[in-house]
Image: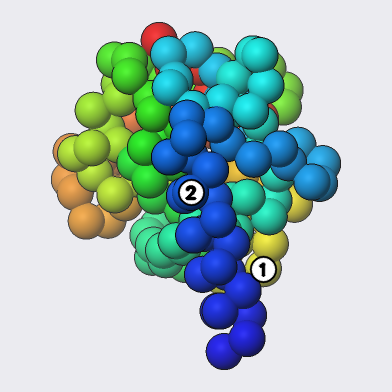
Amino acid sequence: MRRFLLAALAAIALASQVAADELPQPAGEPLLTISGKIAHANTPDGAVLDEAMLLALPSVELRTSTPWTDGVPTFTGVKMSDLLALVGAEGTTVRAIALNDYEVSIPLSDFADFPVVLAYAMNGDRLKVRDKGPLWIVYPRDDYADLRREDVNARWVWQLKALVIE
């Protein structure tokens, strides 16, 4: 209960900062950078989020199969639509960039049309670089036949480090 209360207070504090068009500064190591067409930032180049800032956002669980894992894992993370709302994303595409510099452009509409998750845990375990973490864009492919295509599979960016709103 105490952990829930602390997370709720952190989310309220984060929301009040955003109301002022400014995100708080990350206290920990940066985990994700969001730049481009955004309204809320905490650096001159965009928004930098650390683990605590991501964990302060409402979390969701998504149970879905993937082409890269066995069985049907349960992913925990934040809805991409919530994350993009936090920074005030105002573009039409999101360029997702991985640690190995893999890049793909994703229509911003994907995150409005489907409950896509930015996962930080799988089956209750935090994602590490060796298992596609620390962040992985995960689509609810088992719930939508339209998401079981190769072009959509290319949008499942693991080891995500940056988003550029264009």
The kind of residue on which mark 1 rests is Asp
Q: Where is residue 138 in the image (x, y as percent from the top left)?
A: 44, 46
Residue at 49 percent of width and 59 percent of height = 12
Q: Position of residue 163 (x, y in %)?
A: 53, 24
Camera-nearest residue between 5 and 20:
20
Residue at 56 percent of width and 26 percent of height = 41
Q: Which colour scheme is used?
A: rainbow
In the rendered image, the quadrant that contains the N terminus is: bottom right
The kind of residue on which mark 2 rests is Ser
Q: Where is residue 13 in the image (x, y as percent from the top left)?
A: 55, 56
| Residue 101 visible (yes or no) | yes
CA gap, disc 2 and disc 1: 30 Å
Residue 126, compared with residue 153, is above or below; it is below
Residue bearing mark 1? 125
Give the left or right position of residue 65, taking residue 122 as reference. left
Q: Which mark is residue 16?
A: 2
In the rendered image, the quadrant that contains the C terminus is: top left
Camera-nearest residue between 163 and 155:
163
Rate crowding at label 1 as few (under 14), some (14 to 19) or many (20 or more) other CA atoms within 10 Å.
Answer: few
Give the left or right position of residue 134, taking residue 60 as reference. right
Give the left or right position of residue 39, taking residue 159 as reference. left
Q: Where is residue 99 in the image (x, y as percent from the top left)?
A: 72, 27
Camera-nearest residue between 61 and 146:
61
Residue 63, compared with residue 20, is above or below; it is below
Camera-nearest residue between 1 and 164:
1
* Numbered disc 2: secondary structure: helix
Rate crowding at label 2 as few (under 14), some (14 to 19) or many (20 or more) other CA atoms within 10 Å.
Answer: some
